[in-house]
Each structure stands twice: as structure tokens, then as C-alpha cells.
Image: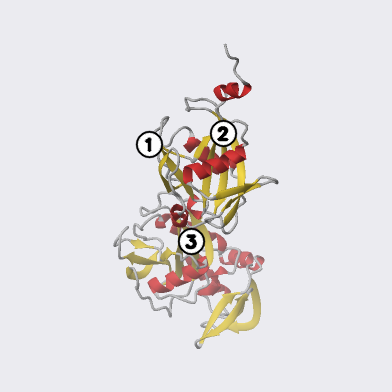
Amino acid sequence: MVKKTNLQTFEQNVMNSVDIIFDINNRYILLVKRKREPYKDYWALPGGKQEPFETLQNAVIRVLKQRLNLDVSGDFSSFPNTLTFHDLDKKVELHQIRTYDSGSDPRGGNTTVFAVQLHVDKNKLIKNLKPGNNVTEFKIVEKANLPKMAFEHSHFIEQYYKFLKPYKETAKTYDASKYEKPSVTVDIIIFTVKGHDLKALLVKRKAWPFKDFWAIPGGFTGMEEALEDAAKRELKEETGVKDVYLEQLYTFGEPKRDPRTRVITVAYYALIASENLKLQATTDVTDVKWFSVDQLPKLAFDHNQILDYALKRLRNKIEYTNIAFQLLPERFTLSELQKIYEIILGKELDKRNFRKKVKETGVLTPLKETKMKGAHRPAQLFSFKGVEKEKKKGKTILRPTKRI
């Protein structure tokens, strides 16, 4: 009986292989279709058996040449190892990712997964590939849409992207497609006082969803548009209202709040004088008008909830800030101020307690001027702190200079 040599023993007992993940533009994966069993006609990673006494890195070089007919060479003298794809004029890092046991491979042994990150036009790469040994065809697929694959190759790819990827993210390699993209809108709640009543500005929608429903003015933001700029643009486009100081209210992001898609909305609100405003329905609305906050219709989306939240914020904030400046002239009496507070809060206030409390807030500046009203003695005038005048098109506009 002839004694087996060490080489024969090695070949019978060990079946190690290499598989290569082509990480293309951090988005695509190169796959080959197998010509032979096991898993004949299945899609798989390019790979193959490690020959006796062959290093894993040299096995990668050989596999790429045999399976894909790539003109490739390697430099394994330093870390990280590098590969040069001569036809593509690309030099890339070769990273050893992980070694797995045979899994569903009936031949046994281990497979070591390597990865290369290529930044290249995928069509250009395809043109440089030719099916080689044990390959009938190849394709480049999105990593999120892998077909049914041989062995545990889909598992290798999943683990690579989730836990094992060695490459650092850069502006060039960042893949925005790996995240879902919710839409972002702005909604603008505008309050005013008309006829001793607190009112909100609403628009009637022209199109689906919620066609013919009343809604808060608003719309989608542009990719290069700041949120506040989008809010001012939408307000002007839908209602004709402009030159309004807006304050960010809250972000509403219930997943099912909009039937079109996942939409996150950033709400703004303002309290303005409406006497000289000319409302005009434009773009995607058919009507625009003021509604009493006590007699609101059923609104589109979650706008009843948003408006209710804005009303609570307004009523809370008016008690300690100068937000009411937009409803009053530059100089006003405490009686005029109390009337505004009563309309917004929806209740009568004790005169003495109101005056004491509002003076304690520190939002008022007493003036030396007075105002005559009927036969009563002159009433002292006040102004709000943190408000400045701005002349625009012949009108005096009051704007906040700081938060109180």
C-alpha cells in the first residue's frame, strides 16, 4: 500500500475558499451565476477554492482572473493590501473581512470573505468583465435588492454592510439610498383679532388628499430651501400674506398623518394685525379666509391637532412675552392691552390684577406720553420692549429684536 503524501492529505481534508464582495459606489454588488453544482444557476459572490500552499490574497488574485477575466495585480507587502485593476485604472484596498465555516456548502471547509470598494461607473465595470471558469453570466445589483443566492452569500453581504465594513464614509462614498427619505413640509398658523374674536387663517385645498377640506396654509420644502424661507414662501403663495414674523412652534411626525407618504411637518405660528391684509387664494387652494378659533371646521390631515397646540402655546406665551406687539400700535394703553389679552385668552380679566401682573413680566416700557379717551383722565402710554420699527413701502412695521 502506497502511503499518502502530506500534500494528498491536505487536499482531501481541507477545502478552503475565498469570496469577494465588490462594494461598488457603496450601493451595488457584483454577482456571478454559477455554472456547476452545488447551487448550479444560482447567483453568488465571485469566489473559488484556495489551492494548496497558496495564500488567501493570491487566491483572490487568481479567482478574479479566472472567474471574471480581470487584469488585476496585488501588493501584499504592507497593510492594507492593495489591488490594481489595470483595465479600470483603479488602485483599491483589499480587506479581509471574516472567515466562515462551510455552512450550507456540502463540500465542507471554510470560506474567507474579502472586500474591495470600487468607485467606478458600473456600466464601465461591466464592459471590462468576461465570464470565466464556472461562471455563465454576471450582473451588478443594488445591495438592498439581492436575488436568492448560493451558500450563505446574502448573509455575508448583510453582515459586511451592518457590522464589518472597514471603509470610512466620505462625501464621495456616502450612500444616501441606504436610508428611507420622509418628506418635509411646513405649516403656518396665523392668528389675528377681528371683531373682538380670535381667528385663524385657513385655506381650502384644491386637490387630493383632503380635496375641498379647510387646512392650515403650508406645503413641501425644497431641497435647497431653509425651513423658514419655505414657510414664508408657502404663506405668500397660498394666501397673499407676507412680511410676517414667524416663530417655530413644533414638529409633528406621526407616521400615518399624511396618506401620500411619510411626511414630517415643521409648524410655525404668528399673531398679526389683519386690518390691511388682502387675502388672495393662489396655487393649490381655492379659497382663503379667517375662522373663529371657537368655530373651526374639520380640517385636513392632523391640522385640528396642530392648531389646537398652537392656540395653547399662544395663550401660554402671551402671559410672559411681548408676542402681542403685532396686534397693537407702537404705543398703547393698558386698557387696550387688556382687551387683546382677554380676546386671546377667551376670558375677562380683573383690571387691577392684570396691570400688576403684566408690569411684573417686564415686557413693557412706560412712556411719558398719554392718550385722551372720552371724558376720562389721560391714560399713560406704553410700548413693548425688544421691538423696533421698520419702514417698508411707506408703512411702519414692528419687528422683535430679541426674545423676552
140 to the left or right of 95: left
Q: Nearer the viewer, residue 367 or 174?
A: 174
Q: Which mark is residue 107?
A: none
- The mark that comes first in sequence, 3 or 2, is 2
Look at mark 3 in the image and give the residue it sits on: 267
Alpha carbon of mark 2 to alpha carbon of mark 1: how far? 22 Å
The alpha-carbon separation of the residues under discs 1 and 3 comes to 55 Å
Q: Which residue does the numbered mark 2 point to in the structure image?
A: 50
Q: Quadrant of residue 304?
A: bottom left
Above or below for 209 versus 81: below
> Closest to the observer: 339 or 178?
178
* Whether residue 158 is visible: no
Q: Label 3, label 2: how many angstroms apart (C-alpha)? A: 61 Å
Q: Position of residue 151 (x, y in %)?
A: 46, 32
Q: Nearer the viewer, mark 3 or mark 2?
A: 2
Which SS class for mark 3?
A: strand
Disc 1 marks which residue?
Answer: 41
